[in-house]
Image: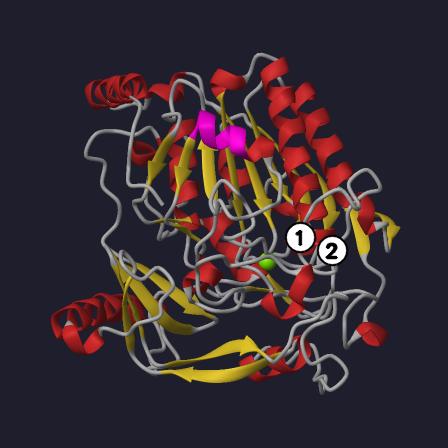
Amino acid sequence: MTSETSCAAWRAIAVGLALMFAETGVHVAAAAPPNIVLIFTDDMGWGDLPGFTPESTIRTPHIDRLIREGTRFTDFYVAQAVCTASRAALMTGCYANRVGLAGALNHTSPTGIAADEELLPELLGRQGYATAMFGKWHLGMPPAFAPSKNGFDEWLGIPYSNDNTKYHPVLADSMPPLPLFDGDEVVETDPDQRLFTQRFTQRAVAFIEKHARQPFFLYVPHVMPHVPIFASEAFRGRSAHGLYGDVIEEIDWSVGQIVEAIDRLGLADNTLIIFTNDNGPFLSYGSHAGSSGRLRGGKLTTFEGGVRVPMVARWPGHVPAGRDCSTPLMSIDLLPTFCMLAGAPLPKLEIDGIDASPLLVGEENAKGRESLVFYAGSELQAIRSGRWKLHFPHKYLVVNGETRTDGKPAGYGRLAPQSITNSGIEGIASRHGYVVRELPLSLYDLETDLGETTDVAADHPDVVAHLTTLADHTRTSLGDTLTDHPGTENRPVGRNDEGP
Ligand code: MG
């Protein structure tokens, strides 16, 4: 990836914005709060997009255009490499551990996002934003946890993952029909998944058209390309990368539809569009999963392939065009950043994210954070500071042998399915075709070893000691079951003991 470059003209605009901010104490955007569009794919791979991995043969002209017209964030992370935890962090600005959510909720889960947490749509809605979500929620199935109870005026989508259905590779017989919600009503069961991307896109465009004169927050957490993958008739068989490529090309089409609506309505200069992803690819699903490209590991791991995700932001006249930002950031930083842009107060409860708007607008000398930690469930497995990433000893998943081309996980046919309620690493391995390995303490230099191949801990004991000290701060506050830290600041998860 190239180092940071910038277009001088945009830099001048950004510096001007920063000066205005410094003089007035009010961000320039607060006078005209921008629309915010957040497009969030599910289980896409770092290696899938030619804009991040040039070797990819998947065609994504609309995402490529966002990269040309905006800033590419090359070191952007999610808080955990699994759906629910990643979304909990995105929506609250907190490490998922702080808000008590981990793993991936399913139809039996009595838990969800706690009522005390103030989510992005709530915070923006109070500032007069119209809010909508079209896609996958995954922060709680019981009605008390629904998007409508958490600030979304409008939503169409599913409450949990699309394999929590008759398509599950080993638990299909025990799965209920998949509900499709429109607002708080179930409007269909087992909807045609081939139409998901089109339907969410149509609703997204209609929402933009309806709210063109009012600030809006549009969240499009696509169900795809999480397995089982589907593309509509218009896209099936079109890509050079099989069905998976078709799915990504349809998502790219969706991006194009949304951008076209914003540009057609004259909203481009007042709309921040962000495209990113919830976690790395579900590698055991072979050709039905994405590629991690040069990164190690994928979904469910704290290697870069699990937690580093493509991210691009476009906001003409504000976010520099044609620039790369390699400062490490995380999805938890989006909430405080959006709040700053919208002039919205931060949540009353403590959060972990930082306001990254100076980095977003390319402010000279804008700083990132000292470190980022990577949890898997309640295990603090790794920490990054600058070029260094330290993994503490932990178990991790690797694909169980040869992968397949039929959408089934590796080892299919000899998998011993355990209950869906077994959320431990062994349970996940048994359901999805992985085996468990052990990683010793390992230090990687991401500047020279993006693929986390060579442990250099023995050469840099000072770095290991420094990163360990930094991690200890988070262990004390948010806990770590690897080192028996209970945590002192974790807040209770939302619980509905009457069940979903
Ligand atoms: Mg996911």
How far, Cα to Cα, is label 1 from label 2? 6 Å
Instruction: Tell me what residue is drawn at x 49 percent, y 44 percent.
Output: 54
Q: Is residue 52 left or right of residue 453?
A: right
**Quadrant of ligand 1 in image:** bottom right
| Residue 82 image point, x, y percent | 55, 63
Q: Which residue is mark 1?
A: 225
> In front here: 348 or 208?
208
Query: From the viewer's perspective, is residue 23 above or below residue 68?
Result: above
Q: Which residue is mark 2?
A: 229
Mark 2 Cα within 10 Å, few/some/many (few <14, many 20+)? Answer: many
| Residue 252 image point, x, y percent | 64, 37
Rendering quarter of residue 148: top right
Tell me the magenta residue range: 64-70
Instruction: Tell me what residue is drawn at x 73 percent, y 66 percent.
Output: 405
Q: Secondary structure at mark 1?
A: loop
Q: Is residue 422 left or right of residue 447?
A: right
Looking at the rendered structure, which numbered label has been put on residue 329?
Answer: none
Q: Is residue 468 magenta?
A: no
Query: From the viewer's perspective, is residue 184 above or below residue 416?
Result: above
| Residue 500 image point, x, y percent | 74, 64
* Residue type at tag 2: Ile
> In front here: 419 or 97?
419
Q: Main secondary structure of the magenta part?
A: helix
